Each structure stands twice: as structure tokens, then as C-alpha cells.
Image: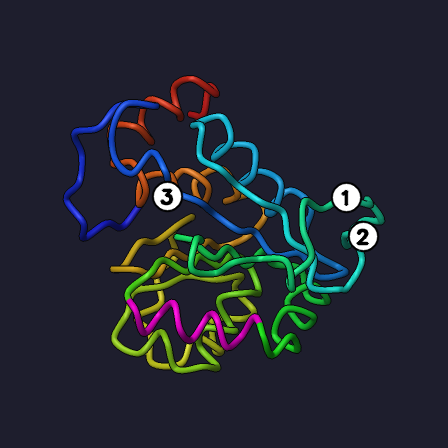
Amino acid sequence: MENNMGKDNMEIGNGGNDMSKVAVFFGTGFEEIEALTVVDILRRADIETDMVSVMGEKSVTGSHKIAVKMDKLLEEVNFDQVDVIVLPGGLAGTKNLEACEPLMEQVDRFVSAGKTVAAICAAPSILGHRGHLKGKKACSYPSFESHLEGAEVLHQPAVIDGNIVTGRGMGASVPFGLAILEKLKGKETARQMAEKIVFM
């Protein structure tokens, strides 16, 4: 993981901002493993993590026809209480997220305020399209690298650069989830979690 934060002395459940709250946004056609791995890892670390539908329904179906029950609809989210926005990939899912203007307004607001926005697979293209990757290191699914406008494109599973976290694709779902955890609770917490889930 690429990390410029230098925050490395915290332990699972015992450091960092234990009141952190994460919102993972789901559009029809999302990549199931990319979205749910993040939810799993963060909840294991006792980080409050909501699954949020941008489709107006409490059940959202992924790219492999797996329906997932959401915790909230977009309009029920109090973004002032959210610390991290997560955008899973999947071609159709990414398009549905990008077409959701209220969510895009919050993405812009978060980036401007220095709050963390994380995107994986096709979804980093959203950040590229909105000008949020200029001068940043980032990664995405290979065929979407041309959409990372202004970024230094890295071929790593997950990249942290300031308040932006990006992941390369489904096979990078665990490193991506661990990178978000690292942002919230530090390198040591992420290392311990990787060991706990037998990630090698």
C-alpha cells in the first residue's frame, strides 16, 4: 500500500478515531466482493459501516445477480456524521453511482474538506472525471486507467494518497479494505487485521 500518512502506532479497537463512520454506496450492478469485503473488514474492526442504496430501494442487486439488503437509502444518510465515502466498482454499479447527483455533490464536498473518499475497480474513474485525482497517485481497473485524469497511475492493489484511497479490482478487495482501515486506525491496526484474516 502506498501511504503518505505515517500513522502506524495504533491497535485494533484501541486507537484512532473509534467513533469513525463509513458509508459504502451501492448501485445496481456493483461488484459484490469489492463492496462487501470492505464492509466485512471494517465491521470486524468495530467501525460503524452502513450499506447505502442510491437506487431508492432497500435491496440492491450486484453484477452477479446477488441481492444485498441495505442499511439505509441515500436520503437517510446524515453526511455530517460520515467520515469516509466508499464507492465500489462494477461497470453498471459505477455508472449508477456517477449518475446519482446528490452523492456526487457529497463526494465533491468530502474531497474539498479533506475527508476520505475511497473507490475501487471502475469507480476511481468517477474521481478522475470530477478532477479529484490531479497530482495524486491512484490505481483502477486496467481498462479505466485512462479515466484517472491528472493522476500518477500505479499498478498496485491499493493506493493511499492523502484523503484518496483507490483499489485496482476484485482481486484487490482485501488490500483496499485494509487501506481504508489503515486510514482510520493506522498501519499497525491494518497489519493486525491482515494477520487475523490470514491475508498473505
In percent of the image, x 71 and y 46: which residue is there? 70
The magenta stretch is 103-113
Q: In the image shown, does 22 or 7 lie closer to the viewer?
A: 22
Task: Give the residue type at disc 3.
Answer: Ala
| First along the sequence among labels 2 and 1 | 2
Q: Which residue is mark 1?
A: 68
Residue 72 at what x, y percent from top left?
Answer: 67, 51
The dot on residue 179 is 3
Residue 144: quadrant of the picture: bottom right
Q: CA distance from mark 2 to mark 3?
A: 26 Å
Task: Give the residue type at disc 2.
Answer: Thr
Per the picture, the main secondary structure of the magenta-coloured stretch is helix
Q: Which residue is mark 2?
A: 61
In percent of the image, x 34 and y 53: which residue is there? 159
User: Element at badge 3?
Assistant: helix
In this picture, residue 106 sits left or right of residue 61: left
The magenta stretch spans residue 106: yes
Q: Are marks 2 and 1 in contact (CB under 8 Å)?
A: yes
Q: CA distance from mark 3 to mark 1?
A: 24 Å
Q: Quadrant of the C terminus?
A: top left
